[in-house]
Image (spheres, rainbow, N blue to C red):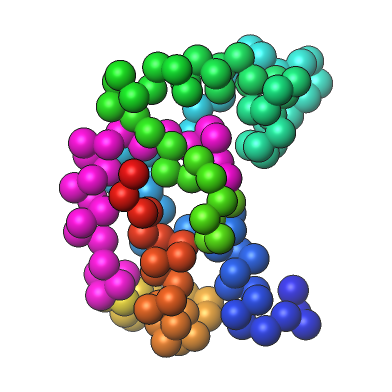
Amino acid sequence: MVSLSDAERCELILRWSALPGASRHHWGSDLDIYDPDLLPQGSKLQLEPWEYEAGGYFADLNQWLSDNMASFGFYRPYDIDRGGVAVEPWHLSYRPLAAQCETRLTPEVLIEAWRGQEVAGCDWVTNHLATIFPRFIAIPKQ
């Protein structure tokens, strides 16, 4: 990671982690779903897409969620790779609440939240937030 440029480092981190203040989980609308009883003994949860694909530990759970989540108001914000956040089949969002939060979270809100805080790379991220925000934070309307 040391030999990477700021842009490369940021991109690698943001594929799997949210910027400080930008995690959808903190809104109370998003959660990660898995069933620990489906993990084989001695296995540890990885939260990687293969666990939810055919042959994965959570394939049946994944199918049930795909078939039923919309009827309960949920959707997957990271259902496909849009060139930003990696695919996260375990990540569900409760649309009625998430939609409200999405409209309130802006680049300006994040910059204000970081003011006076020690955030690694904050100056670089702030200067590039106009390109980072739509790629790694905003979710295209579905």
Q: Nearer the viewer, residue 101 or 117?
A: 101
Q: For residue 122: magenta?
A: no
Q: Residue at x 53, y 60 (%)?
A: 84
Q: Residue furthest right?
A: 42
Q: Position of residue 103 (x, y in %)?
A: 20, 56
Residue 118 % position (x, y)? 45, 77
Question: Residue at 77% across / 82% down in the picture?
Answer: 3
List the single residue furthest toward the front.
142
For residue 15, side relative to residue 137 (left or right): right
Residue 53 seen in render: yes
Q: Quadrant of residue 68?
A: top left
Report the magenta residues as a range.
Answer: 87-110
> Which residue appears at 48% of the width and 37% of the height?
91
Quadrant placement of the C terminus: top left
Foreground: 90 or 142? 142
Which x, y percent locates residue 12?
A: 64, 66
Numbered disc total: 0
Image quarter where the N terminus lies is bottom right
Task: Decide whether residue 109 is among the magenta residues.
Answer: yes
Q: Which is more toward the observer, 115 or 134?
A: 134
